[in-house]
Image (cartoon, grey):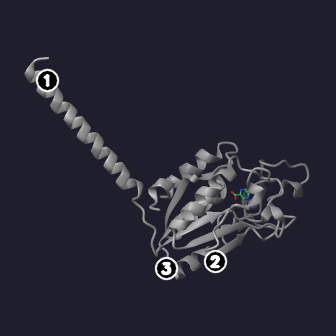
Amino acid sequence: MQNIERRKFVQALGGALALGAMGGLARNAFAAAIKPGDADVFLVIDMQNCFIPGGSLAVKEGDAIVPLINKIAKSFKHVVLTHDWHTPDHISFASQHAGKKPFKAIKVAYGTQVLWPDHCVQGTEGAALAKDLSIPQAELILRKGYRKDVDSYSAFLEADKKTSTGLSGYLKQRGFKRVFLAGLATDFCVAWSAIDARKQGFEAFVIDDACRGIDANGSLAAAWKDMTHAGVKKISSADIAA
Ligand code: VGL
Ligand code: ZN
């Protein structure tokens, strides 16, 4: 190599290394960009036995996110949990509709309702929180879907789109501005809750690696499209400072 060429090569290499280092720095700086504070709440959705492997409406790898959710919860000053909490004869159960199968949609008074296997029946072991979930500091456990004739994927608004669960008022009175969501299932209760959080004026962040989806008939991609449209941000647990 000629000297001049070598010099150029070395310069270029130095530049590339510097850029690489900056990229690394920028990534690391971003990695811990979110430091949860007094106005932030971690909303853990439906981490119940029915939704984890072995349960009646098991979400694939639903158990795998339990340790991560426990860890994330330690980074937050405030945590709220939800329980899907149905009557034994709930409208969302396929078993209540003659000849209907789970995972198929039907029309009900408030619109379309996907039918499910019986799950999260009030007071049963299936409705209990996953045994390895450990968030004793949680400040509120909100039950939803407890009316026989109305489902509630969302932690804010029941499926009739009229009946409030009261969560928005609670969070506002507590002074929270940003809601961070994780749990089960990404494409149903997490997505509907995140979108309704936006509609209620909160910033909403879904911690994607701390969620798992049901993904029935393309529901996961559809949910992300709707969430993005609503201004919900997709983040990773690595974005939250420990
Ligand atoms: C859920 C289906 C039925 C959820 C609850 O937690 O995502 N999905 N009930
Ligand atoms: Zn349910």
Tell me, yes or no, whether the two marked residues, 1 and 2, touch with CB atoms within 8 Å. no
Q: Is residue 227 visible?
A: yes
Query: Mark 3 sits on what residue?
Result: 175
Amino acid carrying mark 1 in the image: Arg
Residue nearest the viewer, comparing 35 with 191: 35
Q: Position of residue 89 (x, y in %)?
A: 87, 64
Q: Quadrant of the N terminus?
A: top left
Amino acid carrying mark 2 in the image: Gly
Q: CA distance from mark 1 to mark 3?
A: 61 Å
Query: Mark 2 sits on what residue?
Result: 166
- Image side of residue 174 versus residue 167, left or right: left
- In front: label 2 or label 3: 3
Q: CA distance from mark 2 to mark 3?
A: 15 Å
> Badge 3 local density, few (<14 within 10 Å), some, or many (20+)?
few
- Image side of residue 209 versus residue 84, left or right: left
Ligand 2 within 8 angstroms of badge 2 C-beta: no
Quadrant position of residue 110: bottom right
Residue nearest the viewer, comparing 88 with 113: 88
- In front: label 1 or label 3: 1
Query: Mark 1 sits on what residue?
Result: 6
Residue nearest the viewer, comparing 129 with 180: 129
Q: Earlier in the sequence, mark 1 or mark 3?
A: 1
Q: Residue shown at 80%/51% (left/top)?
A: 54
Ligand 1 within 8 angstroms of badge 3 C-beta: no
Q: Position of residue 32 (x, y in %)?
A: 41, 58
